[in-house]
Amino acid sequence: QKEVEQNSGPLSVPEGAIASLNCTYSDRVSQSFFWYRQYSGKSPELIMSIYSNGDKEDGRFTAQLNKASQYVSLLIRDSQPSDSATYLCAVINPGTASKLTFGTGTRLQVTL
Amino acid sequence: GAGVSQSPSNKVTEKGKDVELRCDPISGHTALYWYRQRLGQGLEFLIYFQGNSAPDKSGLPSDRFSAERTGESVSTLTIQRTQQEDSAVYLCASSFSMVDQPQHFGDGTRLSIL
């Protein structure tokens, strides 16, 4: 079992719709969770960080964390073609010197 | 500087040569990380620095790989006797020293081994 799992996609949503990206993790003691956006040929860009159960909103982005079920999700409201990218879920586990463990990413395509 | 700076942006070299990759972290960030991303794959952790020390070298794939950091600033990742499987994008990230702080990435060095 991979430590951090994501559906590779592509996830296709029409412009203006809500995109829902999901991530599950295997280590129950994981405590810090991040979403990065990566455009093709570019480096990852931090979008959201979340540490507590519940929702965290930042503009069109909402991160949701459920530690009991070991999943974290990212919702993108009013999706735009510029949101088309690969979204990487990353986790920090205690005792691992803060190294990020990444999922392989979900490719999002926002269609006109 | 404003962001993490990496150089060179691209490096093409022949198999068997040594290469040195450089990372200049965000000012004030004492933690520095190296990751590798092969084409079409996820990011792999290589090594982590807190200040000048490297508490976690667990991700270095072989003894051909080494890294150092001086002055709590610039870090260099050195790959000796490069192999074709070393071809990848090498990404550097930095963060504040506190555990669980978000990491911010540089643009990476694209390394191609002929």
Image (cartoon, coloured by chain):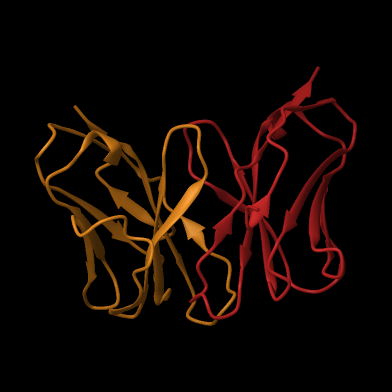
Chain colours: A red, B orange
Q: Position of residue B105 (x, y in %)?
A: 47, 54
Residue at (35%, 54%) from the top-left corner?
B5
Residue at (41%, 65%) from the top-left corner?
B26
Judged from this view, the residue extending furthest toward the left is B17
- Give B51 or A82, whichever is nearer the viewer: B51
Q: Position of residue A103 (x, y in %)?
A: 62, 49
Determine whether B22 is above or below B58 in the image.
above
Judged from this view, the residue extending furthest toward the front is A1
Q: Position of residue A54 (x, y in %)?
A: 89, 67
Q: Look at the image and tell me in which quarter the C terminus of chain A lies.
A: top right
Q: Is residue B111 visible?
A: no
On the rendered structure, is B90 left or right of A47?
left
Q: Is residue B82 visible?
A: yes
- Give B51 or A91, whichever is nearer the viewer: A91
Residue at (63%, 53%) from the top-left corner?
A2
On the rendered structure, is B31 left or right of A95?
left
Residue at (18%, 55%) from the top-left corner?
B64
Tell me which corner region of the image, top left, top right, bottom left or bottom right, holds residue A108.
top right
Determine whether B43 is above or below B68 in the image.
above
Q: Position of residue B81 (x, y in %)?
A: 12, 45
On the rendered structure, is A59 left or right of A30?
right
